[in-house]
Image: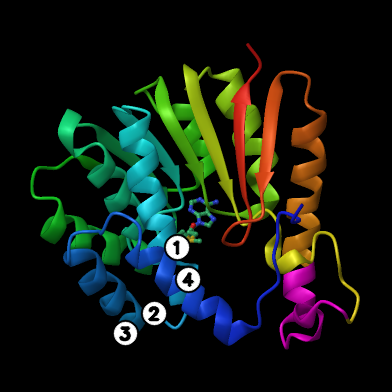
Amino acid sequence: MYESIIPFPAESASTVDKYCCSHSTSLPPFFAEHAAWTVDKFQTSYMMCCQLQAQMCVFLASDRRARRVLEIGTFTGYSALAWKEGMKALGGEVWTCEAGPRAIAASKEAFAKYDPEGKIHLIEGPALQTLQEIAHPPFDIIYIDARKSEYIGYVETILERKLLAENGIILADDTIHLGLVADRSPTNPHSAREDIEYSLQHADNVHEFNEWAVKHPRLDVLLFPIFNGVTFIKTKS
Ligand SMILES: C[S@@+](CC[C@H](N)C(=O)[O-])C[C@H]1O[C@@H](n2cnc3c(N)ncnc32)[C@H](O)[C@@H]1O
């Protein structure tokens, strides 16, 4: 039996990633255009999800016949466009929250260009406040991809305010954080990163969230070691 993570050297992982992208249902060409634009404009373009993750968003929204997606963390709008794409057949809508002024300006530009029907609603401001005020529940999918130290607060507010549909699912992104949540030894090549202090702070925050989520009496949790870690969460039936 294989373990859930089969180690590949970096070059091989990149080749396998491309193989997976080209053997998954393709995205419309504007996704590549928007990703390239983001890379060109933002030094922090690594924050945008990768192509295969966008393909996963499209697949998941379509498979779950979602009509409403709530996204926490817009950046330049790449993943929001993927959620919308996955709900195209049903005309579903996306509410996406962002606090950073540059990201707000960039995502507004992207949505004006790629979402002329206005199916994506950008909510400006701190996510925790937005979650307290948002008035469009229930959401079929809630995608958490913002401040790691607030992940617990996001899910607590989602539960308190009953923002998730009965059979809805929460996806929390970046929950293995380069594997540093579990392994900070020299065996993990990321333990020698230049920004290790910052990365360890992130890893501490997501580890605290992972511990909290798996012990929560009302939640079923599945932490997948895909991308930078994606936790699938649903309320217990
Ligand atoms: C990882 S990026 C999101 C990437 C995006 N989901 C994508 O895949 O294209 C995280 C974003 O969340 C925003 N953010 C961080 N903390 C936030 C907060 N407390 N409230 C709202 N937005 C926040 C950041 O400004 C950043 O643009």
Classed neighbour count for the residue bearing mark 2: other residues with Cα under 10 Å, few (<14), some (14–19), many (≥20): some
* Numbered label attached to residue 12: none
Q: Is mark 2 within 8 Å of ligand 1?
A: no
Instruction: Name which residue type carries label 4.
Output: Asp
Residue under label 1, please give it: 49
Secondary structure, mark 3, is helix
Instruction: Name which residue type carries label 1.
Output: Cys
Classed neighbour count for the residue bearing mark 1: other residues with Cα under 10 Å, few (<14), some (14–19), many (≥20): some
- Residue 194 placement, left or right of 54: right
Q: Main secondary structure of the magenta part?
A: helix
Q: CA distance from mark 4 to mark 3?
A: 22 Å
Residue under label 2, please give it: 42
Identified at 60% across, 22% down, the residue is 159
Instruction: Name which residue type carries label 3.
Output: Asp
**Which one is in front in this view, the residue at disc 4 or the one at disc 3?**
4
Residue 192 on image: x %, y %: 80, 86
Residue 164 on image: x %, y %: 49, 22
Residue under label 3, please give it: 40
